Image (cartoon, rainbow, N blue to C red):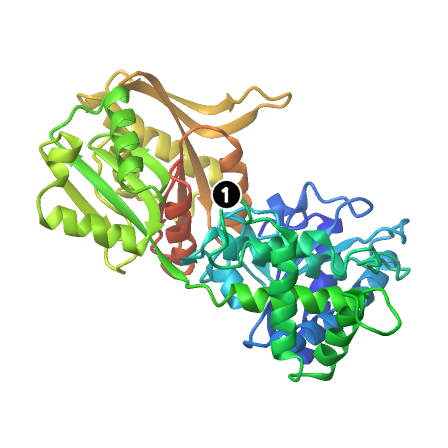
């Protein structure tokens, strides 16, 4: 098993112990991500690197309950800050060394992140601190979407939570009290204004609308809890009512953000789906691919293009389920070939549980992957022997294959314009429409789950299409199937071929 670096191992063990304590107090799932787990922790610096943690609450809570749970989480977070000083020999106690991001199930479903990235919870590797398992994405992430107005409100609320928890080991930091001349912070009311329905053109960011919107919501809900009642009175005075004007505390601002969150979640949730479209009877030229992509974007404006495959022109994309259903209906009406000016169009839902691999493309890379899947290494071979065996297997086939007979194969090839180029186990170069194609092949002996994740980060840095060949016993390989499926939907430049050994 590849080891974490000593510093990363210390940090992970510290976080695992902390996660068990938090879970005993708060029903949640807890994940570590970032430099502590990336590439075995090679980039983790105990003095300078943060520990990045996601805490996903289990229960559906209302605003006050969520705010109180975040307050409880802050006490745990401060304890982790204190422990990491002696454990990791940190010299800096003034700046937070831990970033904790509390999220709800909805935020995970819709891939809402304070950075405004719409792929954060799907395109990262996470380490489940309670189960000790790494995964590509967090389960259920990115399966739904929201309107832009609702999303920006949830991003704001999430950012407020993160700042509320940004307290260092010496208990400094966090959200500063707000005592400006306005009743509420402008960023808050500007965000709320975008949730106001049926405003006149040009008023989407009008802070007056946002202030009244939040005030109406707080007035309606002030009897739900003592905290909301007290906040209602404080803002009433800040709006000009009689009484002693007081600043908004960090908890007041957190509670307002959670009220904003509740309003945003009243917007409808849109299911998402990953699918493929195959065009029949057209040349696989670069210009034709570009044309079809542009026309597809015009027909499905909410689509995200995940990749275009050689061979047949196949486009993998992600869109709302509504758009896919519309496309399916257009296919049934037989209007898609005429629209795209091709002989035929096929659609495939990749999330129907039956054919996640998608259409068979029969391009060069696809054929090479199929050939590798037929290779049978010896269980007793070491890494270098297996690599040599695979190279011979491919060379013998390439020499007899009509389309790839001119391909060249090199072992231990340097790739990349880096100060320290990366080395690929095998590098193939062959003619492809539009020029030369390079394909890296990396051999991974899977004894533990982490062997796959250790090599995945490295493969993504190669910068060329890559086939990861996983060699291991069937039960080890089958445990990685959910992660392989997630990867296939997110990164079309990396393909995974599993080759089972008869024994370990």
Q: Which residue matches tag 1?
A: 456
Note whether residue 216 is visible: yes
Residue 130 visible within the image = no
Q: Residues within 10 Å of mark 1 (few under 14, many from 20)?
A: many
Q: Quadrant of the C terminus?
A: bottom left
* Position of residue 254 measured from the top left corner of the image (x, y, whole percent): 71, 65
Disc 1 on helix, strand or loop? Answer: helix
Task: Please indicate whether residue 455 sits to the left or right of residue 227 in the image.
Answer: left
Determine the residue positioned at 26% across, 32% down. 295
Seen at 73% across and 83% down, the residue is 226
Q: Residue at x 71, y 55 (%)?
A: 9
Residue 70 picture location, percent across and down: 70, 70
Q: Nearer the viewer, residue 445 or 179?
A: 179
Is residue 322 positioned above or below 464 on the image? below
Task: Between residue 30 and residue 388, name the one nearer to us.
Answer: 30
Q: From the viewer's perspective, tell me whether residue 279 is left or right of residue 357.
A: left
Relative horizontal placement of residue 103, taking residue 368 as reference (left or right) = right
Which residue is at 47% across, 42% downward?
Answer: 382
Determine which quarter of the picture holds residue 146.
bottom left
Where is residue 281 shown, x and y percent of the image? 11, 29
Query: Where residue 496 sits: x, y (%)?
Result: 37, 44
As rendered, which of 82 and 422 lies closer to the eye? 82
Q: Is residue 393 above or below residue 231?
A: above
């Amino acid at each position: 098993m590849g080891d974490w670096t000593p510093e990363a191992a210390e940090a992970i063990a510290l976080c695992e112990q902390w996660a068990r304590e938090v879970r005993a107090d708060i029903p949640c799932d807890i994940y570590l991500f970032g430099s502590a787990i990336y590439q075995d922790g090679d980039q983790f610096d105990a003095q300078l690197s943060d520990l990045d943690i996601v805490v996903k609450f289990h229960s559906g809570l209302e605003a006050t309950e969520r705010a109180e749970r975040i307050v409880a989480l802050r006490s745990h977070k401060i304890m982790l800050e204190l422990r990491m000083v002696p454990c990791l020999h940190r010299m800096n106690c003034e700046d937070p060394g831990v970033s904790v991001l509390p999220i709800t199930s909805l935020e995970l479903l819709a891939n809402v992140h304070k950075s405004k990235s719409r792929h954060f919870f799907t395109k990262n590797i996470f380490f489940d601190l309670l189960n000790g398992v790494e995964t590509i994405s967090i389960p259920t992430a990115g399966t739904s979407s929201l309107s832009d107005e609702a999303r920006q409100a949830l991003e704001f609320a999430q950012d407020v939570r993160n700042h509320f928890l940004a307290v260092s080991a010496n208990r400094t930091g966090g959200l500063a009290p707000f005592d400006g001349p306005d009743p509420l912070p402008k960023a808050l009311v500007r965000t709320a204004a975008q949730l106001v329905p049926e405003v006149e053109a040009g008023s989407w960011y009008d802070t007056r609308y946002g202030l009244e919107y939040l005030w109406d919501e707080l007035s309606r809900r002030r009897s739900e809890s003592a905290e909301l009642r007290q906040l209602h009175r404080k803002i009433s005075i800040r709006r000009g009512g009689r009484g002693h004007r007081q600043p908004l505390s960090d908890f007041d601002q957190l509670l307002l953000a959670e009220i904003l969150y509740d309003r945003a979640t009243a917007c409808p949730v849109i299911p998402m789906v990953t699918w493929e479209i195959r065009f029949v009877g057209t040349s696989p030229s670069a210009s034709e691919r570009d044309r079809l992509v542009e026309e597809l974007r015009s027909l499905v404006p909410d689509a995200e293009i995940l990749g275009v495959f050689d061979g047949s022109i196949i486009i993998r994309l992600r869109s709302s389920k509504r758009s896919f259903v519309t496309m399916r209906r257009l296919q049934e009406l037989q209007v898609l070939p005429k629209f795209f000016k091709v002989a035929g169009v096929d659609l495939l839902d990749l999330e129907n549980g039956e054919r996640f691999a998608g259409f068979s493309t029969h391009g060069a890379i696809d054929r090479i992957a199929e050939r590798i899947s037929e290779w049978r290494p010896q269980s007793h071979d070491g890494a270098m022997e297996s690599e040599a065996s695979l190279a011979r297997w491919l060379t013998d086939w390439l020499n007899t294959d009509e389309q790839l007979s001119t391909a060249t194969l090199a072992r231990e090839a340097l790739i990349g314009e880096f100060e320290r180029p990366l080395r690929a186990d095998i590098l193939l170069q062959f003619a492809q429409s539009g020029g030369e194609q390079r394909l890296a092949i990396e051999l991974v002996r899977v004894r533990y789950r982490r062997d796959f994740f250790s090599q995945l980060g490295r493969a993504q840095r190669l910068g060329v299409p890559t086939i990861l060949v996983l060699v291991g016993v069937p039960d080890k390989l089958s445990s990685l199937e959910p992660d392989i499926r997630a990867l296939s939907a997110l990164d079309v430049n990396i393909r995974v071929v599993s080759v089972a050994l008869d024994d370990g």
